[in-house]
Image (tube, coloured by chain):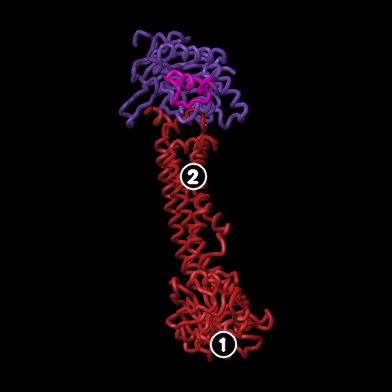
Chain colours: A red, B purple
Amino acid sequence: MIRLALRNLMRRRLRTIFTIAGIAIGTMAYVGIVALADGMREQSQRLVDHLSTDITVTRAGTPVPWMAWIAPEELEPLKSLPGVRSVSSVVVGTTRAGARDLFIVFGADSREPIVQGLTITSGQALRAGRNQMLVGVTGAKQLEVVPGDRLEIAGTELEVAGIFETGRGVLDASAVVDLPVAGALFGGQGRVNMAFINVDDGDAVTPTMNTIRRRYPRLEATPSELFASRLAYVEIITGYARAFAMLALLVAGVMVANTAGMNVNERRQEIALLRSIGWRRRRIAALIAGETALMLLCGGLLAIPLAAMSLRMVDSGDAAWIVPASLGIGHIVESLALALVLGLLFAGIPIVQALRRPPADALRTL
Amino acid sequence: MNGLRLSCSGLTRSFEGGLVPVLRGVSFEVESGERVAVVGRTGCGKSTLLSILALLDRPDSGELRFDDTPWQSIDSPEAWRACGVGIVFQLHHLLLHLTAAENLELPLIGSAGTHDRRQRVDAMLDRLGLVHRRNTLAAKLSGGERQLTAVGRALIGEPRLLLADEPTGSVDSTTSKRVLALLADETRRRRATLVMVTHDLDLARQLDRVMPMVDGQIRASMESL
């Protein structure tokens, strides 16, 4: 049967190639878009994970935490809550830098573990009170800077003190500056975008969050391990991305149906002949569905390297912060399964129509 | 295994919502292993009758039995054909993108294993005298070779009932003789029933019985032709 299906596909080589190409592009779009959407969540979470904190504090009700400010006096009382060991403040700013249209700059107190924990691969650590910056290894490569160079960030010239590497895509593509410097760069005037709390022991996380919510309703406390999944903007973007990705797959499905329709229509007499020599409708449907499945499989498999290539292209650009660490097997399996289900569903319509016709009708016209 | 016994009575079939009556009460019987020819002019309803006998089409009314089984009792006409009916069409209807062997193999797919299929295909190619054309695409076979392959395809499932619609209508006289000899020999050897539709009276007379068909009815006398 598989041999027969292959022979049938080879009979209309050009149509088969175009259909496979269409499926590959549709699947690639699905895999790519979904991977990027998930990558955004993944990278945000990896960033927070890197900081090894227990609770993340943001402005309540804001879908994008780094677009809202929190005043220092709002954070000050948190330090004296029972069970709280430390509270670190962070400013997150985006700016244009060199060839990068979107460059993320994190501001944190240079004496805090968040900054002290960074592995400096060349140059030296940040010194408080200086207009200095640490640049991630990816960012340094893209901006072509080395320690000692000067770089203009948001209209201010900063000295590159060192290069760090964390293995976290979003951090390595960004820069870190001292908190007061970040405040000056992005107009925070002492305010911050987020704060991270470490508690004395794991059991204190929930009571501490409950206390913050109760006493300080203008602040939102989230367990750091769930930070990315609670980001409303990520959910919105992910939702839209999945919808568009599904649309791409639907277009591929319609194309498969069109090809199957043309194939079935042109093969009405062949189908009638197969029925006349004793082929059951089930078997004929399986043959045509098998041909469709083979095209879908080829297109799906072709989509994997295409999606990986397209993500690699994005990875080296401004959008590196949303690129997942790797093209997950889940995305591939999901897209292949969806393409298969959609394709067979669409192709099923012309197949069923063709098999309903009495074979004598088609054979009479021979 | 003996051939199927056919009996039909008062078969009618019309098209275009009844405006074009083609079969107008066809009645006849064919004994098991008998080889009969239905002879008539173009448009008299021969092919429609054959389609109904093959259950490729349904009669509007009348009775049709295979042995003692009414046609309505046959749940799956495809399965029924697979188990004992071979059809030869006027045109070969081979799948041109497949080889001669692959075309012969088609009726066996699903009912026989790969090894068995290969053996039966080779034996049939030998009987057809087409061993040397085994792997030739049907598109590259001559007209006669195509029709012989089509006959082989109908015979390879060892049918109890063989239905042939003008099997020699599109081949030269030499091939015509080979086709007829093949059909006659194979049905005699297996005691299969043969119903052949033709407009060629000389060809029809080589079978056991000739049934003239005129205006959608089987007549008793040849004079009506």
Please identify the quadrant where the C terminus of chain A is shown.
top left
- The percent coordinates of residue B199 (x first, y second) are 37, 14
Main SS of the magenta part reads: helix
The one of B184 and A256 positioned closer to us in this rendering: A256
Rendered position, B3 above or below B80: above
- State which quadrant residue B168 falls in: top left
Q: Which residue is mark 1?
A: A128
Judging from the image, what secondary structure is the residue with disc 1 in?
loop
Q: Which residue is mark 2?
A: A295
Q: Is residue A270 left or right of residue B190?
A: left
Q: Amino acid at mark 1?
A: Ala
Farthest residue, direction left: B19
> Callout 2 environment at 10 Å: few (<14), some (14 to 19), or many (20+)?
many
Count of labels in the image: 2
> Callout 1 environment at 10 Å: few (<14), some (14 to 19), or many (20+)?
some
Mark 2 vs mark 1, CA separation in Å: 61 Å
Regarding residue B70, the answer to whether it shows in the image is no
- The percent coordinates of residue B70 (x first, y second) are 50, 26
The residue located at (58%, 57%) in the rendering is: A329
Q: Amino acid at mark 2?
A: Met
The residue located at (45%, 22%) in the rendering is: B141
Chain of residue at mark 1 = A
Regarding residue A40, the answer to whether it shows in the image is yes
Magenta span: B132-155
Rendered position, A185 above or below B176: below
